[in-house]
Structures are given as C-alpha cells and as structure tokens.
Amino acid sequence: MKVTELTPALLTAVLVAGVSGASFAQDKSAPVSAQELKAKTDYCKTCHGLSGQGFRGSFPMPRLAGQQPEYVKNQLQAFIERRRTNPVMFNVAHVLTPAMVTALSAYFKDLVPKPLGGAPRDSLAAGAKIYEEGVPAADVPPCASCHGPDAKGADAFPRLAGQLHDYMIKKLTNWDKERGQDKANPDSSAVMEPIAHKLTQAHIKAVAAYLSTLE
C-alpha cells in the first residue's frame, strides 16, 4: 500500500508500531548510533519524502530539509506536550529520546534537495513584496525581519525557503487551531499568531507561492 492510500487512523497505527518498541527499549541518555539514526531517518521519509524535501499525498507533508535545528527541537517538544495539534506527530514525537531529537535536528539541517515547487506563478511578485516589505496597511511586518533575507531562518525562527506552498497556506490559515494550544506555556511561534490573523487569503497564497520557489 502506498503512503497516499493510508487513512489518517491507519497511518497513525503504522507510525506508532514502527517506533514504539525500539524507542522505549533505549536508554534515554544514551548517544544515538549511526545505525539508529539511519533507521529513524528512513522512517521519517514515509511522510516527509526523500531527503526531507516534503511530500504531497492526501495532504501536504512539510519539508524538513535545511530546517533550523532549534526550531525542529521546539516543535517536537510542542507535539510532545500537545501544545501543537497533530495526531500523527503526537505519537511520533513522544517516543523520541532527547539525544534522538538532537540528532534528527542536525541531520535535517544539512539536507539540500531542490524544492518540490508546483505553486501558481502569477502572484510571485506580490509574494516577494510581502516577504520583503510586509503589508503596512494591515500592520504586518516584513517576513524577512524574522526569517532572514534568504528565508532560511535562524535559531528558533524556521526556514521557509522551499517549503511546500500548500502546506504553508494550510498552516497560516489554521494557525490558532493548531499552534499555541497551551496559552500558559507559549513558545517562540506565538509571535506569528497576530500576524497570521492579519493576513488575507490572497496575502497568504502569494507569499506561500513565492517562498516555495526559493532554494
């Protein structure tokens, strides 16, 4: 059966079965061997595609290649603590040891596959303008002020360059339904909540299309 044919419930069951036994058997303080890391990264390909480039199946899976390690660690912890909503990643993240989280974060940072592309190209100029200048009339700052002029992020601010446009559209549109689910324990992504609310669908689609073309 192909990944695209799996229902969300079945995919969750496969993910849990694939990681739980091995992970619980590990000493959580033990370093990660090359063999263990390869087994886990091969497993990540099931959803996130070859070389972490992202994948389009029943719904878009995000690109992890080139992502900032601190951001990856923060988001995995948010899944573990159920501050970020995703039923599949709940089950994947909570069995990862701290050493494995660190190893995975470093591994994905060094991957540089070409973006998958596929976004409409008629709004790229508008998207570039939003990214570089913001939307002053809506009190939206330039995206580049946090994510950098090349959209590769830094530290806790994520890389956006090359991310799947349809994934970004979905995340920005549903920001407060998926992120910051524990208001008493926010993380650095809380800065995006008011910005996401101020962006129109036209803004979101334009900037997502532009970012998906960047390498």
Image (cartoon, rainbow, N blue to C red):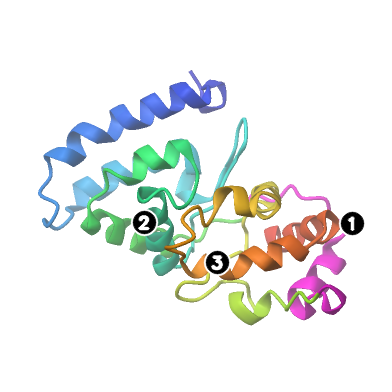
The image's mark for residue 190 is 3
Q: Amino acid at mark 2?
A: Gln
Q: Is residue 4 above or below residue 72?
A: above
Q: Is residue 142 magenta?
A: no
Is 25 positioned to the left or the right of 175 in the image? left
CB of mark 3 within 8 Å of CB of mark 2?
Answer: no
| C-alpha gap between disc 2 and disc 1 | 37 Å
Crowd rating for badge 1 (residues with CA inside 10 Å; few <14, some 14–19, many 20+): few
Q: Is residue 207 left or right of residue 189?
A: right
Residue found 45% across the figure and 75% down from its top: 155
Image quadrant where residue 199 sits:
bottom right
Front of the two marks 2 and 1: 2
15 left or right of 118 in image: left
Of marks 3 and 2, the one in the foreground = 3
Q: Nearer the viewer, mark 1 or mark 3?
A: 3
Location of residue 166 in the rendering, given as x and y in whole percent from the top left corner: 70, 47
Q: In the image, which residues are magenta?
A: 116-138
- Magenta run includes residue 127: yes
User: Which sits earlier in the primary sequence, circle 3 or circle 2?
Assistant: 2
**Between marks 3 and 2, how big is the CA–CA gap?**
15 Å
Instruction: Give the amino acid type for the residue marked by disc 1 in the picture.
Output: Asp
Secondary-structure class at tag 1: loop
Examine the rendering and report whether any part of residue 148 can be seen.
no
Horizontally, residue 20 falls left or right of residue 188, namely left
Residue 103 image offset from top left, x and y in percent:
28, 59
Residue at the image position 33 percent from the left and 56 percent from the top: 104
Query: Residue under circle 2?
Result: 77
Q: Which mark is residue 122?
A: 1
| Quarter of the rendering occupied by the C terminus | bottom right
| Label 2: few (<14), some (14–19) or many (≥20) C-alpha neighbours in 10 Å | many
Measured along the vertical axis of the image, is residue 127 above or below residue 42? below
